[in-house]
Image (cartoon, rainbow, N blue to C red):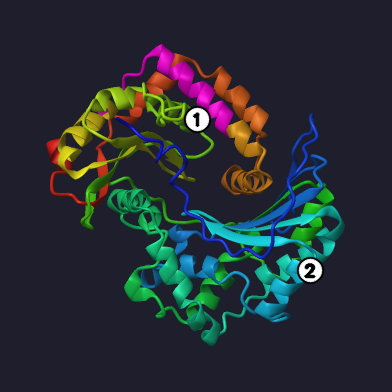
Amino acid sequence: MSSKALATPIIRHVTTRGYAQAAPAAVKNNVKIQSGVLSNNTFVAALDNGSPVARVTIAFKAGSRYEPQTELGIAHVLRSAAGLTTKNASAFMISRKLAQVGASVSASGDREFIYYTLEATQDNLPEAIDYLSNLVSNQEFRPWELSDNVPRLKFDLAAIPPQVRAVDLLHKATYRRGLGNSLFIAPKKIGNISSESLQHFASTAVTTGRCAVAVVGGSQERATMVAQNLQIASGPEGQSTASTYFGGELRKEMGGDLAHVALAVQGAPAGSPQSLALAVAAKALGTGPVIKWGADNTPLAKAIGNVGPFAACGFNVSYSDNGLFGVVLSVAKDEANAAVKAAAKLLKAGNLSADAIKAGKNQLKVQVLSEAENGTALAESIAAQGLYTRSVKSPLEIANAIDQLSSSDISQAVSNAVKNKMSMGAAGNLAFVPYTDEL
């Protein structure tokens, strides 16, 4: 019996500092995304969809893969410090002024990027943008405020779902450094990253060449204005050391009644046709039951069989130079051996029926188009595309690209992926979880 516990994306962890609640957006049809690169190498893009609420995302190549090996966890501290006192305004003033204009600001991050996203009504957007620019450009990281922020970091760690821990361990086992750096600061490092270290990391990562500005609900001129008003240092486009796929496994014994396991092989980099094909294949493997309380008839659920309650889904994640394709499952500790071996066998076989691929294409299109209705998710997606490829595809263009994929394209991408060594990350009660050389 399967559950819906893993139906939502679990790869990208978000740390948010919210100030107010924004109104829902209205969408205007038949609009195109405008984009370009400024003279200072900042990427800007805008989608003027007629929404009464505008979303502005400023993204930087400052994710965990760019962390110095001596300061692991500093990207987590940076995004957690969003909204603290800047050179021009205290944390209290930023919070109060944004609340007065009904705006909200959030900071989120993944292994590649950090995103600062503003939501505000069109009438109050200019004033809210001033505070967003100040929040991004003029951070001071005062030592006493960083000390006050320690409980927040501890809460972030305490709130990590075990499935996310498994995926985080999977990255560490797979890439070791770079993309293998954890999204989260280690408990022993909390309070030990100094203001000077944070300021140095921000000064090297928060630069024009590593920046993208995306506006949903505004013009490209607005996006250009936001980018030009940022008071950040100029610098080249950020380059990181290429992350090599090594393969391996890491296990974290946490006790409890469940085992949480992530299995993966090497995937494809973002923007490549293979990445889109593997995204379809991940949906085709299974994402849990599509009807509440209904049966799970996906290939992954059928392969695991009747081993008791479990949750399982396929996943695909792509980065600038690499990717992972695999499955994540949570299962009772006593059933872990059979369930993990069954999931690994299905993954290594790489055989997906035409019906499963058709269902996967439809589910991925629904996800892409549904996420486009969320202005914040769309703005961050546009910014990420700009930093990845210096170009942007609209959700409709991505959906059309999914339609154009043939079953043979998807099968070939999966066949190429499963030739690679399998990696594993596991957390929970691992007494009966097999090792990778036993799969």
* Local SS, label 1: helix
The residue singled out by tag 2 in the image is: 100
Q: Is residue 375 magenta?
A: no
Q: Residue furthest bottom?
A: 144
Q: Position of residue 57 (x, y in %)?
A: 67, 54
Q: Is residue 366 magenta?
A: yes
Of 69 and 398, the residue lying toward us: 398
Question: Within 10 Å of the Cα at label 1, are there few (<14), some (14-19), or many (20+) other Cα atoms?
Answer: many
Q: Secondary structure at mark 2?
A: helix
Image height of 255 relative to 50, above or below: below
Displayed quadrant of residue 20: bottom right
203 to the left or right of 32: left
Magenta: main secondary structure equals helix
Can residue 219 be seen by looking at this rendering?
A: yes
Task: Look at the image and give the residue range highlighted in magenta.
Answer: 348-367
Place residue 46 in its image quadrant. top right
Q: Which residue is mark 1?
A: 276
Residue 237: image quadrant is bottom right
Labels 2 & 1 near each other (Cβ < 8 A): no
Q: Residue furthest right?
A: 123
